[in-house]
Amino acid sequence: MGPADPGGPVRFRVRIDGNPPGAARGINLGDRGEGTASDRRLYQLVRQPGAVGEHTFEITFLEPGVEAYVFTFG
């Protein structure tokens, strides 16, 4: 994902089951589940520790002008 041309960085927020990801946050998120899409590339948003189970993933873009192409799990 990344900003649409000629857009600038786009902030986003990730929630798992309605809460910040905490220990499950990926390397591209801050402690509260917030990040910035500054270029078009793959972002690691979640890294589930321990046993993997069923969860609800939510991403909210805090500004317009972002493009997201694919989500991968596994």
Image: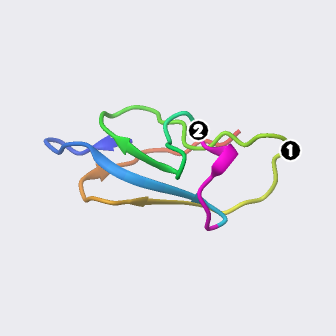
Q: Which residues are magenta?
A: 18-25
Q: Is residue 35 left or right of residue 24?
A: left
Q: Secondary structure at mark 1?
A: loop
| Residue found at the very far left of the displayed protein | 6
Q: Secondary structure at mark 2?
A: loop
* Residue drawn 66% across the image and 43% down it: 73
Q: Quadrant for residue 36, please give it.
A: top left
Picture layout, residue 20 above or below residue 71: below
Q: Which residue is mark 1?
A: 51
Residue 5: % across, % down: 17, 42
Q: Is residue 4 magenta?
A: no
What residue is pinned by disc 2? 26
Q: Earlier in the sequence, mark 2 or mark 1?
A: 2
Q: Residue furthest bottom?
A: 18
> What residue lies at 55% left-to-right and 43% top-to-bottom?
45
The quadrant holding residue 3 is top left
Cα separation, mark 2 vs mark 1, equals 16 Å
Q: Position of residue 41 (x, y in %)?
A: 39, 31
Q: Residue at x 33, y 60 (%)?
A: 62
Q: Position of residue 63 (x, y in %)?
A: 27, 59
| Residue at the image point whose x is 59% and y is 57% from the top | 20
Label of residue 21 in the image: none
Q: Is residue 66 left or right of residue 47?
A: left
Q: Quadrant of the C terminus?
A: top right
**Please, what is the three-letter code of the amino acid marked with disc 1?**
Ala
Q: Amino acid at mark 2?
A: Gly
Dominant secondary structure of the residues highlighted in magenta in the image: loop
In the picture provided, is 10 more to the left or to the right than 35? left
Q: Nearer the viewer, residue 50 or 64?
A: 50
